[in-house]
Image (tube, grey):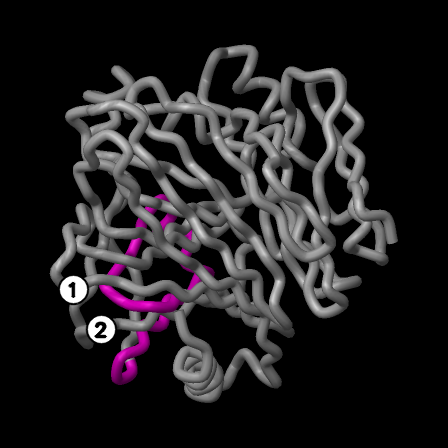
Amino acid sequence: MNKILHFILFIGIALSVACDNTGPDMTAAGVKQQSQTALELDNGQICLAVSPDVGRIVWFGKSGGKNLLWLNDQTSIEQALKKSLWPNYGGDKIWPAQEAIWPVIYRSSFPASHAFDGKPWKVIESGRTKIVMESGTCPYLAIKGVREISLEGNSAVIKNKLTRMQNNPFPVHIWAVTQIRRPEYCLLNMYDPGAYRIRSWSRQSNSMQIFTREKVLFYPTNQDGCLNEKIGCMGDFVAGVFDDVIFMQKTSFNLEGCYPDKASIEVYLCREYVELETLSESKLLKKDESIENKVIWTILITASVKDIAATAEILNHNRLSTGL
């Protein structure tokens, strides 16, 4: 298996995925470069690929299996770039500031960051099961990001760090947005049962169907009437449940910290994909100060997606058996 996944570009790019032995199952986003490579990590259990040139994770799944991440098609990316709109590449990336103050920071609602989303990250270290990459400095926030990604068994451990390079008036947080293929449903762990928050960008009335069982929030993703709606809560795991695997993301949270959405985990429903989102607390950093967090991605096997209680038990067992 090749350790480098080659991209073929001409503004748009098609990705040849070495992780998937069944043939290409996705198309990577378009960029305005002439050549590009993605770095693959594979420990025999799971496979993950990072594209430093667009600053994101572009592949995650079982070794030899399918990609669980959603990537946008070449035509949509190319059209967005031609119109100078925000190009939604897909995959997993970091946004360093809360959405409510984007217009103040960036003078527009998008792009989310001129140095993080869709921009090149420098590879600091690269091996068979570990990669470390560093962003450029965001001029609007005066911060630089570092992501350390390593494979451990059936998990990918992602350590994120933001460092302030100069004094700046805006607070920052580590908001990781992972776009995945639409699963059967999502589960969120609630610290406070029933304490969740719904945000809607839809013109339709809020009709989201949500079910709770003890400290687990069950969110079916077949609700096309609830597109562009987000649910979030304070908790330490969020998961997308597919027909044969569970994609779990686990993170820690600080009950005394500042969370702009009053949530440390969120799920956003879109027609083409679902977003699993983890958020650190928000802090106003001085020069040379940093904020860090860790997110663990785990692939778990499920016998039946119909048995929601059993699936929730699998997640809770993993939550307790692996620490942050």
Q: How many labels does the image show?
A: 2
Residue 142 on the magenta segment:
no
Tell me residue 191's x, y (percent): 22, 73
Q: Give the range drawn in magenta.
A: 213-237
Task: Residue type at mark 1: give it.
Answer: Leu
Tell me residue 266's x, y (percent): 33, 56
Give above or below for 313 relative to 147.
below
Give above or below for 298 relative to 19.
below
Residue drawn at (70%, 58%) of the image: 47
> Taking 278 as reference, is 2 left or right?
right
The residue to which callout 2 is attached is 191
> Taking 84 as reference, is 154 left or right?
right
The residue to which callout 1 is attached is 255
Residue drawn at (81%, 41%) of the image: 16
Q: What element carries label 2?
A: loop
In this rendered view, identify the residue nearer to me: 77 or 323. Answer: 323
In this rendered view, identify the residue nearer to me: 308 or 17. Answer: 17
Residue 224 on the magenta segment:
yes
- Sooner in the amino-acid sequence: mark 2 or mark 1: 2
Residue drawn at (28%, 77%) of the image: 212
Res. 225 in view: no
Res 303 → quadrant: bottom right
Comparing marks 2 and 1, which lies closer to the viewer?
1
Q: Quadrant of the N terminus?
A: bottom right
Give above or below for 164 relative to 60.
above
Task: Residue type at mark 2: give it.
Answer: Tyr
Res. 33 in view: yes
Tell me residue 125's x, y (percent): 63, 42
Categorize mark 2 by other alpha carbons within 10 Å: few (<14), some (14-19), many (20+): some
